[in-house]
Image (tube, rainbow, N blue to C red):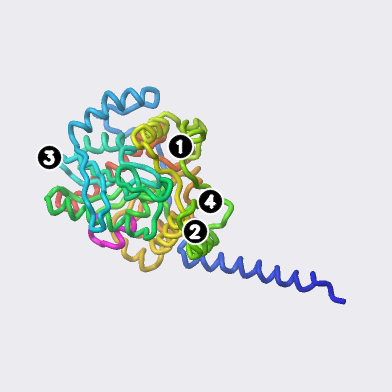
């Protein structure tokens, strides 16, 4: 009698081979790359040495006090908070900081479960560099509610984020408020949104800055390719509004304190400040993402890295990748940066995902490098 295991073993081998093949084919079609020969190691010392001596740079040691004494009064004097109502009735909240001698207009696009105020330190610096700044809350974030079920981050169409921003820019453009070259700055999920905006509306922006862009999500123990397949299956069976793996609702007992050792940044003070701001100013803070958000985000990443998508990116791009990032995969960033003729890509050693909340030396170098990038765009735009 033939043992049933004699049939089981070939079946398991076949399943394993099919699974491996699917992963390999997915990676090739998705545009993921294991490396980028043109990526440079970011020299913090070099760029910090060029930092403006006219800035009152904030320090980690006095961050709370300096935000209160310097940044908040400055931004209150130079900007205003506004809202627009989109075609579907969605309210979009944004802060606008005009500049009488603007050399560029910078649109800041935040990441998952973030909010426009989290970039106030950067806004403070860039506005002093003669940049107009627009900081926006994406739909379902910050003051651009409503949120998904139980304050989750929910999305049925990822490109809706980009379409919302196109409507905002159209609104501001018709009022004559967009001065100089338009530069998009996107962090993490905001990087994916900014990139899709450039692909959907070629020529809209003259420069693209991507900080730890979410071009391939780190899906943990579930390999990236299979997470995409699984998320689509869950949504097809009606589970799209449930929380995705490693996500969940805000829990006051677990989430009220900002951990000193965390996944987001190697330093503490900046992250703690904005964590506390989020909890103090958003009574029901948004928190985890749903299966539908995951499925649409992964689908968007595939569009971004497709041959057609990459061909639409003809503008100058500045890309940052954090060496210790465990939120997004390097393969997605490599896939984009290695395929664009005008991409300048940096790997930042010993830093984590939220580069804009890192240590003092890096922040000064980061702001300075971005200032040089924006200045390089002005001649092409007649400024």
Select label 1 or label 2 by which is in front.
Answer: 2
Select label 2 or label 4 by which is in front.
Answer: 2
| Residue 160 image position (x, y, % from top left) | 32, 58
Residue 27 shows in the view: no
Q: Which residues are magenta?
A: 195-205
Residue 265: give its label: 1
Q: CB atoms at circles 1 and 3 under 8 Å apart?
A: no
Q: Residues within 10 Å of mark 2 (few under 14, many from 20)?
A: some
Q: CB atoms at circles 4 and 1 under 8 Å apart?
A: no
Give the spatial CA distance, label 2 vs label 4.
12 Å
**Residue marked by disc 3:** 100
Number of marks: 4
Q: Would residue 204 be counted in the magenta stretch?
A: yes
Q: CB atoms at circles 4 and 3 under 8 Å apart?
A: no
| Residue 79 image position (x, y, % from top left) | 19, 37
Q: What kind of element bears circle 1?
A: loop
Lower position in the chain sequence, tag 2 or tag 4 = 2
Q: What kind of element bears circle 3?
A: loop
Residue 245: give its label: 4
Give the spatial CA distance, label 1 vs label 3.
35 Å
Select label 3 or label 2 by which is in front.
Answer: 2
Give the spatial CA distance, label 1 vs label 2.
32 Å
Lower position in the chain sequence, tag 1 or tag 2 = 2
**Residue marked by disc 2:** 239
Q: Residues within 10 Å of mark 3 (few under 14, many from 20)?
A: few
Q: Nearer the viewer, residue 103 or 78?
A: 78
| Residue 257 image position (x, y, % from top left) | 47, 31
Q: CB atoms at circles 3 and 2 under 8 Å apart?
A: no
Q: Nearer the viewer, residue 379 or 65?
A: 65
Lower position in the chain sequence, tag 1 or tag 3 = 3
Lower position in the chain sequence, tag 3 or tag 2 = 3
């Amino acid at each position: 009698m033939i043992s049933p295991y004699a049939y089981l073993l070939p079946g398991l081998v076949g399943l394993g081979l099919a699974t491996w093949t699917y992963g390999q084919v997915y990676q090739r079609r998705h545009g993921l790359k294991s490396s980028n020969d043109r990526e440079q190691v970011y020299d913090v010392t070099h760029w910090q040495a060029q930092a403006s001596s006219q800035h009152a740079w904030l320090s980690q040691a006095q961050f709370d006090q300096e935000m209160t004494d310097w940044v908040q009064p400055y931004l209150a004097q130079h900007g205003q908070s506004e809202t627009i109502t989109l075609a579907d009735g969605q309210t979009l909240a944004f802060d606008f900081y005009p500049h009488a001698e603007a050399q560029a207009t910078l649109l800041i696009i935040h990441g998952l479960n973030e909010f426009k105020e989290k970039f106030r330190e950067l806004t403070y610096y860039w506005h002093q560099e003669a940049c107009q700044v627009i900081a926006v809350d994406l739909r379902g974030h910050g003051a651009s509610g409503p949120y998904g079920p139980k304050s989750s981050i929910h999305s049925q169409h990822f490109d809706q984020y980009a379409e919302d921003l196109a409507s905002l820019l159209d609104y501001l453009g018709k009022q004559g408020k967009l001065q100089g070259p338009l530069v998009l700055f996107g962090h993490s999920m905001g990087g994916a949104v900014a990139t899709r905006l450039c692909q959907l509306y070629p020529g809209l922006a003259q420069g693209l800055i991507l900080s730890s862009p979410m071009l391939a999500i780190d899906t943990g123990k579930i390999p990236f390719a299979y997470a995409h397949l699984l998320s689509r299956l869950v949504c097809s069976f009606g589970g799209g509004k449930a929380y995705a793996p490693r996500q969940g609702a805000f829990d006051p007992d677990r989430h009220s304190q900002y951990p000193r050792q965390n996944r987001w940044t190697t330093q503490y003070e900046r992250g703690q400040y904005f964590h506390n701001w989020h909890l103090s100013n958003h009574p029901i803070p948004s928190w985890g993402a749903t299966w539908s958000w995951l499925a649409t985000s992964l689908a968007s990443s595939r569009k971004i890295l497709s041959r057609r998508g990459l061909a639409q990116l003809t503008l100058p791009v500045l890309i940052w990748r954090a060496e210790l990032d465990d939120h997004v995969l390097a393969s997605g960033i490599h896939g984009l940066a290695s395929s664009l003729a005008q991409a300048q890509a940096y790997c930042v050693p010993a830093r984590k995902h939220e580069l804009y909340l890192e240590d003092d030396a890096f922040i000064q170098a980061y702001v300075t490098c971005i200032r040089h990038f924006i200045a390089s765009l002005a001649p092409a735009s007649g400024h």
